[in-house]
Structures are given as C-alpha cells and as structure tokens.
Amino acid sequence: MKYSTLPRIKALLALIFTGRIPDMLKLLLGMFLICPILCAQQTNTPPDMNQQTAQMLLQRMDQLEATVRELRAALAQATAAIPRPAPAEAAPPSQREPEPQVERAPSEGMDLNKTLLRIRGFSDVTLHGSNLKGDTSSFSLGQVDLFVTSDVSEKLKFLSEIVFEAGRDNLFGVDVERLLLTYSFGDFLNVGVGRFHSAIGYYNTAYHHSTWLQTTTGRPFLFQFEDQGGILPIHNVGATASGRIPSGALGLHYVAEVGNGRSSRSPLNEPVQNVLDENNRKSVNFAVFARPDAVRGLQAGFSIYRDLLAPQNSPRIGETIFAAHAVYVGLNLEWLNEALVLRHAPQGTSRVFDTPGFYTQFSKRFGSYRPYVRYQYVHASQSEPVFPDVGLRHGPSVGLRYDLSEFVALKLQYDYTARGRDQAIHALALQAGFTF
C-alpha cells in the first residue's frame, strides 16, 4: 500500500498518552488523523486493482475501524481515571486531602451548654471528736453530692442533687435531695415544680448539699437538715415561683412556694413528704429580699411560712415560721446574720410554743486563708410538742479555712455548745472538702 498507517497510529498514541494535547481534542484528533488515512487508501486505489486486493483492503479498513473503537474505549477509561482539578475560583487556596471518617466526640457535634447533662461533684472527709457521752473520734465520709443540671430548652431548665450518704449504721443510702424543673417567663417570673430547698431565710437557698461551698465545716444548727436533727422544713415538694419586683436600684425579689410540708406523725417517718401528704392542707411560704445596687454583695429580707401538722394521737398543730436576714458576702469579707421564730399552736388549746433562734457568722480572707467565727443560739421549750429534745443551745465556733487549690479546701474548727443544765459539748473537726 502507498500509505503506511502504523506510524501515524503510533504517533497518535504517543500524543494522547503523553498529555501534550488537551483531553477534549484527543478523541477528535484520533478520528481526524485516522479517517484521512482510510480515505486515502480507498481513494488512491489503482483502477486496475483486482478483486482479491480490494477485498484485502476492505478487511484492513474493518480492522482499523475496530482499532479506533478500542482506542476510544481506552481513552474514555483513561480520562475518567485521571482526577480533574477544580476551577480556580471554586477551589480554596490550599486543598487538603479528605480526612478519614472517624467517630467524633459529642462535644464536636453538640452544644454542651444546651443539650447535655452537666454534672458537678462535691464531697468531704472529716476527722472529728467531742466529749459527748457515747461519741468516739472518727473519720467520717461526708455526702457525695452530684449536682446535675440541663437546659431542656431555651425556657426550661432542670436541676437535681443526688446524694450518697452514710448514716450512723455505716451503711450508704441514696437520696434525691433536689429535683426541680423550671420554666422561665422572664426576669419577673420563673415557675418550678419538684423538690426544692424552702426559701426560709438566707442560708437554706444559698448553701446546698456541699461543705466545700460553705466557709465552715457544717451548717448552723437552725439550718441543719431534717435527718440530722434540724428543726426547720428544709426541703419541700410542690411548686415555686420567683422573680424580680420592679424596684429600680433597690433590687427587690420575691419567692412564693406551696408544697406538702413536713411529716409529723412519727419521728421514724421520712421527714420530707415526697409522694403522699399526711393531710389535705398544703404549706405555703412567701419571701421578699433586696439586693441594692449601691452595695454589691448585700442582701436583706424576710419570709413567712405556714403549715398544718397532723401528729399521730395528738391534736393538729398550726406551724408558723417568721425569718429575717441581713448578709454581706464580698470577695474577701463575709458577714451573715439571721434570726427566726418558730411558732407551734396546737388546736383546741390557747397555748402557743415559740422557739426563737439566731446566728451570726463573720469571716475575712487573707490570701488562701480565711479565719472565721460564728455564734448561734436556739431556745425551745421543754414541752415543745414537735421537738421536745432541743431545749436551750448556744455557743461559739471558731475556725480556719485554707484553700489548698481551686478545688480543695482544708478546715479546722472548734465548737463549744452550752446546753442549759446538761454538760457543755466541746468538739473539734478537721475537714477536707473538695469538688470534682
């Protein structure tokens, strides 16, 4: 034949696979370079070509067409396998390879402040002893308090305190000390339901189940928890409403509560009525306090609590608690003052039993050290119908708190308690309180 096709095909393949021509022209060049060859072979055939030679040329053309089809298929596969760069305007300045797909931590895909439970823990270990008859010097594990909060939605907030605590039998038990679901309508109204600390005075809502939060090793006697011999309804189950009162720089706030109140039928019963109320009457409490803008850290207010107790085999007893407080809590200075009167009025009699009590506590911070002093007083009648074992108790406490770190506090405290005609109690405690 006059024209040789193999050198041209080889040249074409070299151009295609060395990338010297654009991808879009590869196929067209292959077709245009090969087709003229075929046409030339057909056009320049001598007129005197015999039938056998023409048949061979036709077979050769069929082979070349098959080769073109194979080249097209190979070219399509090779082009599809080569990654095409993105347009300059669509690609970022530096394109990193895609990272392998790994399981991400919840914090990377979720807002911890809005969707997940937040848990803060508190506890303490105390070495204590006293001259009280039957008391022994002991190491004691304090409450293990898990403070749990969650933002259910923008308006709904949840909190609870789950406490693991050992009793005098050395056995651990679990109590849900607080469980409250609150809906916020704004600064002037927040409504909650569940179990909460009664807004009686100041200490009960300022310091919950954690000695680490408190300056001292323990709570004032007036605000001791019910299962530790306290005389106030520290906890309540019901509904609460709170908010600001429009008052400008005076900073007035209110708290209104209604609940089951405390149990009084038997000292052996659980003092907090978590499920059933022993009567149809509900306790009510109302508190008002001010936080003036002129003195940051100052709070003063009062509260009044009312309930009807139904002790077993005794007439019902009307219970009223008047409380007032004036406190200042600054960065380096703390001064707490509270006073209350607990009144019990048995029905069917004109006799009224008033139990007055107060405490004052002062502390000042010097770096990591905070010395403090507290004096407390309570005087109940020997014939008091609800807690006849309290009687007269008063005396000072002195101590020193040392913040070992941001999360650990060491406290040393001495307590003196005079008990009327009974022997006075001298007690010493060394405590390590911490949060985690």
Image: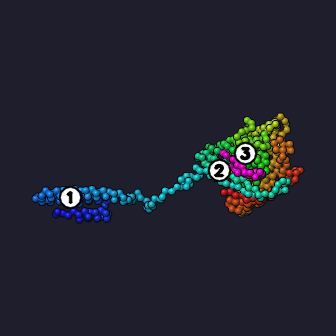
What residue sits right under mark 3 in the picture?
235
Q: Residue at x 81, y 41 (%)?
A: 344
Instruction: Answer with mark 3 or mark 1, whichever residue precedes in sequence.
Output: 1
Name the element at disc 1.
helix
Please state if 341 lies on the left or on the right of 78 as rendered. Answer: right
**Three-letter code for the amino acid on which mark 2 is drawn:** Val
Please provide percent x and percent y for residue 295.
70, 53
Q: Residue at x 73, y 59 (%)?
A: 432
Please provide percent x and percent y for residue 341.
80, 45
What residue sits right under mark 2 in the picture?
148
Rendered position, 241 above or below 72: above
Q: Is residue 178 magenta?
A: yes
Instruction: Answer with mark 2 or mark 3, whichever residue precedes in sequence.
Output: 2
Q: Which mark is residue 60?
A: 1
**Three-letter code for the amino acid on which mark 3 is drawn:** His
Whole-number angstrom distance, CA of label 3 to CA of label 1 = 103 Å
Magenta part of the protein: which range? 162-180
Question: Of 295 and 180, which appears nearest the observer?
Answer: 180
Please state if 408 lies on the left or on the right of 91 as rendered. Answer: right
